[in-house]
Amino acid sequence: MRRVIISSLSLVLIFPGLCCKKETKTVQPNGVVSFISGIVTIEKQGAKTPAKIGDNITEGMKIITGDKSIADIIIGENGIKIVENTILEISKLFKDDKSEGETTDLTMSKGKIFSRVGKKLIKGDSFQVITPTAVAAIRGTDFVVSEIDGKSNVACLKGKVQVKDATKADSKPVELNAGQEVNVEKGKTLTVQDLKEENLKNMQKIIEDINEIKQDIRKKFETQRDEIKKAVQDQKDSNRELIDKQKQENRENMDKVKDSGKENIQGIKSDFGDKKEGIGDSVKKFEKPDLKGVKPKIEKDSIK
């Protein structure tokens, strides 16, 4: 029988992509709810639960705010403020290990959000807000996107934002610089204009709120860290006290056992002495009896 030997080089020649293909791994980072006011709901796979500060936000989740309600979420270095009557879905959230690129896609069916992208995006990074009528893609900026009754508005406070009409496949994007905005409505041309004073003030107020929230979160984490350290030290001290107490009890018990042992030995010796005396008395009772007079007298004349 012939033996068939296939070297790794042969495998590469026959199947060039088999041995050398490197899989691209992706990591799905989490966001976190950092602030809540009013009624805020998280929906995942059809199940709805009330949102709480500290909840993890992952891909596929929806954040729903009610009347006069606000929710803030932090994703990495990016902050997002969701205002009242908004439905926002985290449609994409992952990091590519190979290119180190991060992708964040937020789909808003209605409402209004403010986004602050704290990290300067690099090649491979993507941060988009998608509405039924608009797609806003940014390169490191502060901006607001709103969607009301089939009409979107994108306003840029800092950096640059690219906006295109989501209802047209061949829509050419327009670029917003700081202090500009654009309305996006089906069938209408995108026209960039200066940001209205009212919108500018609202955005500045939102930025201040986000900065305060980040500081509060940092302080909270520092406080929790100190509390954890103190709790760990307190537990160590408590454990040490318990160990010392147990050692002391063990020593006392050993001393008691030793004393008890001595008493038992002394008792045994005393009992043995008493028994010895009793045995002596008994032995005396069995001394050799006096046989004098017991021996029979035999007459010589009776013996012939």
Image (cartoon, helix red, strand yellow):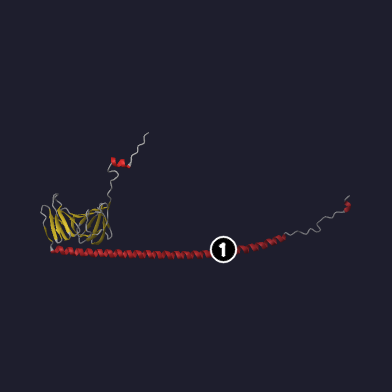
Q: Is residue 9 visible?
A: yes
Q: Is residue 4 above or below residue 46?
A: above
Question: Residue 271 location in percent, x, y?
Answer: 63, 63
Front residue of 68/53: it is 53
Q: Is residue 30 above or below residue 21?
A: below
Question: Residue 202 location in percent, x, y?
Answer: 17, 63
Question: Residue 36 location in percent, x, y?
Answer: 24, 61
**Picture residue at 30% right of the left edge, 63% below the top:** 221
Q: Quadrant of residue 220?
A: bottom left
**Picture residue at 31% right of the left edge, 42% below the top:** 9
Amino acid marked by disc 1: Gly
Question: Residue 229 location in percent, x, y?
Answer: 35, 64
**Picture residue at 55% right of the left edge, 64% below the top:** 258
The residue positioned farthest toward the top in the image shown: 1
Judging by the rendered image, the residue that carries numbered circle 1 is 261
Q: Quadrant of residue 93?
A: bottom left
The residue positioned farthest toward the front in the image shown: 9
**Picture residue at 19% right of the left edge, 65% below the top:** 205
Q: Residues within 10 Å of mark 1 (few under 14, many from 20)?
A: few
Task: State left or right for residue 285 relative to residue 83.
Answer: right
For the residue labelled by badge 1, is the local secondary structure a helix, a strand or a loop? Answer: helix
